Amino acid sequence: MYLCGFSLNNLSLMALTIATGFVVDDAIVVLENISAIWRRG
């Protein structure tokens, strides 16, 4: 990591940001599917 110029803190922050993005994206997909099922009745 030293050769790339990243510290462990920066790498951890990027990983947390990406993980949060995945969780939010999955939640949006689930809500869209629930909405589509409700519309179909």
Image: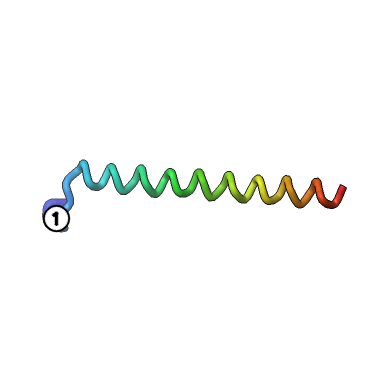
Q: Residue at x 65, y 46 (%)?
A: 30
- Image-based side of 12 in relation to 33, left or right: left
Please give the residue where the numbered disc 1 appears in the rendered image: 5
Q: Nearer the viewer, residue 28 or 7?
A: 28
Disc 1 marks a residue whose amino acid type is Gly
Q: Nearer the viewer, residue 38 or 12?
A: 38
- Image-based side of 8 in relation to 39, left or right: left
Q: Residue at x 68, y 51 (%)?
A: 32
- Image-based side of 25 in relation to 21, left or right: right
Residue 3 vs 26, above or below: the answer is: below
> Residue 22 location in percent, x, y?
48, 48
Mark 1 nearby-residue class (10 Å; few <14, some 14–19, many ≥20):
few
Q: Residue at x 29, y 44 (%)?
A: 13
> Residue 26 location in percent, x, y?
56, 47
- Image-based side of 41 in relation to 2, left or right: right
Q: How many marks?
A: 1
Q: Specify how the rendered protein is coloured.
A: rainbow
Q: Residue at x 14, y 55 (%)?
A: 5
Q: Which picture quadrant has residue 19?
A: top left
Work out which residue is located at the far bottom of the displayed protein and give it.
Answer: 4
| SS state under label 1 | loop
> Residue 35 location in percent, x, y?
74, 48
Q: Nearer the viewer, residue 7 or 20?
A: 20
> Residue 40 location in percent, x, y?
85, 52
Work out which residue is located at the far right of the displayed protein and give it.
Answer: 41
